[in-house]
Amino acid sequence: MVRRALAIAGALGIVAAVLAAPAVSAAEPGEATVVPIQVTGPVSQRFNMVVMGDGYTAAELPKFREHLNKHLNVLWTIEPFKTYRSYINVYAVEIESAESGVDCDPDLTSPRRDTPLNMGFWGGCNPSSVQRLLGVDGAAANRYADQVAGTTRGNRQLLAIGNSDTYGGAGGTNATASGGNALSALITPHELGHSLGGLQDEYDYLARGERGAPYTGGEPSSAHHTLLTERQMLDQQRKWWRWLGERSESGGVIGRYEGGLYSGSGVWRPSAHSMMKTLGYYFDQPSREQMTQRIAAKTSILQDGTPTGAPIGADRVVWVETLHPVGHRLDVRWTLDGDPVPAAGSSLNLSTLDITPGVHTLTATVVDPTEFVRDPAIRSSTALTRSRTWTVDTAVTTTPPAPTPVEFTASTPTDRPVGGADVVYVETTHPVDHIPAVTWTLDGNPVAASGNSLALKDFRLSGRHTLTAAAGSSSLTWTVDAALPSADYELSDALLTVPKPGRPTEYIYNGPFTMRLDGADDTPGHVVREFQTDGDGWFNYFGWPTDPDAPFLFTPEGTNIDNLVYGKLGVPRLSPWDDATPSYGRHTVQYRAIDPAGNIGPPGEFVVTLLPAPPACTGTVTGRRDGPLVISSGVTCLDRAEVSGPVLVRPGAALVASGSTIRGPVVGSGATTVELLNTTVHGPVSISGTTVAVTIVGGQVHGPVVLSDNRTGSRAAVLAGATVSGPLFCAGNAPVPENLRAPNTVRGPRVGQCASL
């Protein structure tokens, strides 16, 4: 029987004092089973993640597995976890809970549940805590974790997932997260940034909705916070000076952005938004560099090698075994008495070298050449550089024979498909007199490889393939999943849809709209979906914060949920005081999917133009209306109406016609607003002297259109995607009318400012 738990606190803005809220005593252990989820090597030689659930009854354990699958698949898409996934073992502890759910969810008045880990909101039902702090009994969690043989508090990280759809988690030595909330899987990497990476929060607030006080301390010890200017960082070669000016992995450019460490001003961070500020974005480069060092430091990139206890002869093979990142090879460099020895790979046959008589020093140095690290101190640390040294004595002329069968001893796991860009490796036994030959075949065809590893990205594969490695009488086979996942989108009804053959479809909205992203792949498992707006950082599509099944909502200013802001186009915002400039205008949205094997599908794209919403109606006309309509004041709306007669909009009044039919001329003179949206007019349209907005989108005008002397401030008159059965004349309008790249069909001459519309 096994048990364990773990906790996560993602982007919660919770300080250490709150995180230290007292835990509640654990219930008696329930039935539990340890399930290996991903085993890349011996427990003693890997970084081990132990994940357990609380509040899942025996019947709900499949739900826990579903939550765990999503957490892990999201984690493996985020660097550096994606590249160093092969350094990590993952074990699940499936604990049967007597009752379903967790304590005080969502309120202090909510019931307490009988669960083995006593997880609960409000820091374990503490009235002085905060609602979203999801506490766990750490002692109980560690008792369960101890049943994963070989793991210790020094080589593992605990994560406890609570059976709840409420947003919440906690960080620290252990991490917690609710399992079913839209953002739950994104809390995990953020909290690992704290507990594993030693990173600090980049929030500019402590309490939600209240901007933090100015920072008053000295230069922060945090690697990703500073008081220095960019010039000072460069001149003093401090903090993230090596990354300045580069495109941030989390969007924008690496620079200096005010706010962090819960302070609203007086301290600066590297990126506008990253994992440590906004859930959904990637780690930026300074944080990623530190995370790379911390993950690698949890194990050893030099795993084993020829014993070093006694001098060795010059007639033998010397070898080392290394770790193997998923996306690149480690470098193995050999030197003899300090001079480089040409050698490829992790084994060196000394008998092929012209070694002079005497005693010599042989060194193998393993270096991780990852582009994630630029700091020489990190590069040369034991996390990324390890050496082993031997004394070679030519007087020891004969190495004792040691017949060794050639067989595989370790490899990339074969129990799951490998991605089309992965590096696949094997390790063999180590005869003293020769280097075992490893042969590789792809779909039965021999392929050239560098020793004991094969970089699949060199083959530019697509679809599914079979990869085989053979050495001696042993062979291993992998399924190569190079089939790219696909993504598709679904938008709420647009004011106008503009198909453009061979180019992204364009949509025009005049109010909030929703986007649903779907991902598909040919293998089971959670498919991660991402989107980015206007080339900003890729953002995890998690549905909507309050409902993972609800589509993402875009509004001009964003939507405030628990004093965090989501869904603003253009310049994103998280805190209510971030750039709230409405995101009207044209925006490009890209989207893509990432499958469980790590393959990234090709991005799709669409374009959205967001117009200001029409003014609020003071009167509405629906159905049929006979005779003329004169609008003298207020805002009259025609909602799928049919007006048999002319429509006159007098000075200071406004007309908004949506999906309507007007059988007569439309004349606006000195109006504040005239909007004809997907409306058909049987007669001429003449709009002049308008002061706020002129908008004609879609629909038909059976007659001429005249737009003249409309002075609408910074908002140009719009004539887009409409059909005009007559001449089009525009003059004296400021700004000049535009068509939002949605061409009009005009069956008559186009004159003046509208000649290109």
Image (tube, rainbow, N blue to C red):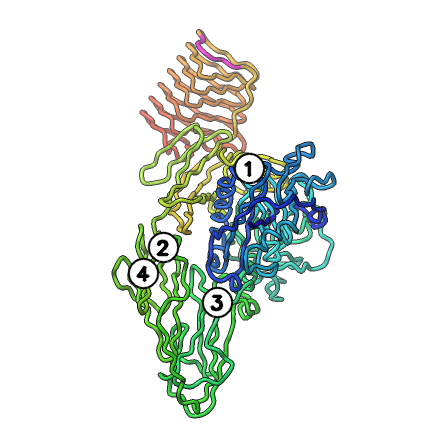
Name the mark nearer the viewer: 3 or 4: 4
Q: Amino acid at mark 4?
A: Thr
Q: Amino acid at mark 2?
A: Gly
Q: Position of residue 216 (x, y in %)?
A: 74, 54
Res. 545 mark: 1
Residue at position x 38%, y 57% from top?
414
Observer-nearest of 437 and 734:
437
- Contact? badges 2 and 1 (CB < 8 Å): no
Q: Secondary structure at mark 4?
A: strand
Q: Can you say whether 9 is above or below 736 in the image?
A: below
- Check disc 4: other Cα within 10 Å, few if <14, some if 14-19, many if 20+: some
- Contact? badges 3 and 4 (CB < 8 Å): no
- Check disc 1: other Cα within 10 Å, few if <14, some if 14-19, many if 20+: some
Q: Which residues make up the magenta segment?
A: 620-625
Q: Main secondary structure of the magenta part?
A: strand
Residue on which disc 4 sits: 468
Residue on which disc 3 sits: 368
Q: Position of residue 22 (x, y in %)?
A: 72, 46
Name the mark nearer the viewer: 1 or 4: 4
- Check disc 2: other Cα within 10 Å, few if <14, some if 14-19, many if 20+: many
Q: Amino acid at mark 3?
A: Asp
Mark closest to the chain's N terminus, 2 or 4: 2
- Mark 2–mark 1 Cα distance, whole angstroms, equals 33 Å
Q: Secondary structure at mark 1?
A: loop
Residue on which disc 2 sits: 420
- Mark 1–mark 4 Cα distance, whole angstroms, equals 44 Å
Mark closest to the chain's N terminus, 3 or 4: 3
